[in-house]
Image (spheres, coloured by chain):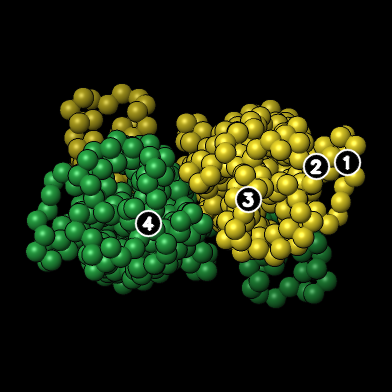
Chain colours: A yellow, B green
Amino acid sequence: MTIKEIARLAEVSTSTVSRVLNDSGYVKHEVRERVEKIIDDTGYLPSDTAKDLKKKNTKLIGIIIPKLSSRTIGLVADGITKVLDENGYSSILANTGLDFKKEIEFIKIFKQKRVDGIIFVATNIAEEHIKLLKKMKIPTVFIGQDSSSYDFSCVVHDDYGATVEMTNYLLNKGHRKIGFIGVDEIDRAVGYQRRRGYEAALKEHGIDVDRNLISIGNFEISSVDASMRKLMKENPTAIFAVTDNLAVGAINYLLKNGYRVPEDISVVGEGDSGIAEIYNPGLTTIKYQYLESGEESARVLMRILKTDKSEKKIMNYRLVERESARKI
Amino acid sequence: MTIKEIARLAEVSTSTVSRVLNDSGYVKHEVRERVEKIIDDTGYLPSDTAKDLKKKNTKLIGIIIPKLSSRTIGLVADGITKVLDENGYSSILANTGLDFKKEIEFIKIFKQKRVDGIIFVATNIAEEHIKLLKKMKIPTVFIGQDSSSYDFSCVVHDDYGATVEMTNYLLNKGHRKIGFIGVDEIDRAVGYQRRRGYEAALKEHGIDVDRNLISIGNFEISSVDASMRKLMKENPTAIFAVTDNLAVGAINYLLKNGYRVPEDISVVGEGDSGIAEIYNPGLTTIKYQYLESGEESARVLMRILKTDKSEKKIMNYRLVERESARKI
């Protein structure tokens, strides 16, 4: 169906149909009704693509995410799309499926689709991405990783501050031997900043960092058993895992091996990912603002589309006390 | 940056730049290298929008989903985007945030963006949507709800069959009073089909359906306590909740009220949503193929883009036995 066919069916000129579609200029009431009825009956909608060529922007935002079947990322994506929708923007979704080589490919597709901006849910920042994004001059906001040193806008969580606070929480409950389950430091936020927070809090309390109390695995719950076997040799009184999933893995390991949580050993996580609340025992953890960080990133993007001035936003967090840790 | 500017910088004609970009026709090696270097340095990429007008399709697929912060839907979306990507398609994501009035609005946006097809992760099917989609003539695949009676392609889970099997499982373990926690039947798959499966299995075993053993709530875990208070008055030996989240809510209620699971009462769910495996006790549940249903829907769409012949695919399921139910 084209505008010409609509005009023919309604027995009017194409410019009359245009006026009806754009709601501009005078059209007789009965003519307008006739045209609208035909438009309605035929399901005709004007194509954006032709208009896009004349307009400055496409009202499309590219979103790069590592995967969707993670509640954390799902919340971020819900927040992004909510605010984009409120502002009349649609989104092209690029799901890398944790294959980071795809990020470069998707950035190029975004350029071809003429997106007005990009929101990048990043697990790490590679020089190559920064270089390409700078070349392409598409306004971009990173979520979860600090890109401000490259002069890119970002919305970050206070991973360092939150981890210092949680470590202090355990220290104040009398724990001195705190096993730490971390992830690779190529992930600057969860790997590097959280480990740095743990070590800083210990040092502040005059406690030497014991390498034997630290185990670095990956994000998979299946990696926890090996970490726990190593850590339990040191007889820790508490385990601090950098994600809730890893903390739940640690509790499962302990229960299977005859320990009670928190009576025999305390366990805490970070993320407040949904499971923390419904797990048994309830998990003491850090609640990061995932949904809100998604919303905020879209708001930052809306602003930099106008001002071109980069911003860095640090989101709040909250320590949520449940049943998995106790005073000794 | 335009093709003209590239040509000026490279000191060649625009048609030479075109030949380099499209890799067609003869271009001297050193000229090609010079043009490619400038294209690379400036970050120029040809715009798809101009090309789209001439081409038949945009290689864009619209995806409608109710929300992303659900592991189930996240898995479906991971599956969809994986197969679309493999086939060279990008996706425009429309997240309704459970506001179903938005679905109509998004279908219209898809039409304006000239998507080649639509994948609709549906919680229910409204006549209005069907009417609009038929008018617009955009190939569409529904996931999770049976749209075959409207001659639309769909990929569905065998909610009825799976629920019959799980009910039989409990019956074979000696349970006769099985409390049922369901959701509203406006959700044909989870609300209507699963309840129908539960009732059919009971009848097959010569057991009358007892209305007092059925409680219909919503998907929120917070609705479970009220359901459990009602059901426990009937002294059931087992609880069958239509989702894992609701089953976990039921277990939490039981543990808080001094019952042991499964020693005092058995609990089963459906979905195998991740929590089932890491919850304590491990939850006996139905594993539906969410990731695979997303992949399959994209494959069906790829086929109907060529053949225009609608398909209905029924995905497999599997009963996963863990620790939350026992023989009595």
A17 in relation to B278, above or below: above
Going from N to C along the chain, the mark reached first, 1 or 2, is 2
Going from N to C along the chain, the mark reached first, 3 or 2, is 2
Host chain of mark 1:
A
Q: CA distance from mark 1 to mark 2?
A: 8 Å
Q: Amino acid at mark 4?
A: Pro
Mark toward the viewer: 1 or 4: 4
Q: Amino acid at mark 2?
A: Arg
Q: Amino acid at mark 3?
A: Ala
Host chain of mark 3:
A
Do callouts 1 and 4 point to residues on the same chain?
Answer: no
Label 2 crowd (10 A; few <14 / some 14-19 / many >=20): some
Q: CA distance from mark 3 to mark 1?
A: 23 Å
Helix, strand or loop for disc 2: loop
Helix, strand or loop for disc 1: loop
Residue highlighted by disc 3: A247
B142 in relation to A45, above or below: below
Q: CA distance from mark 3 to mark 4?
A: 24 Å
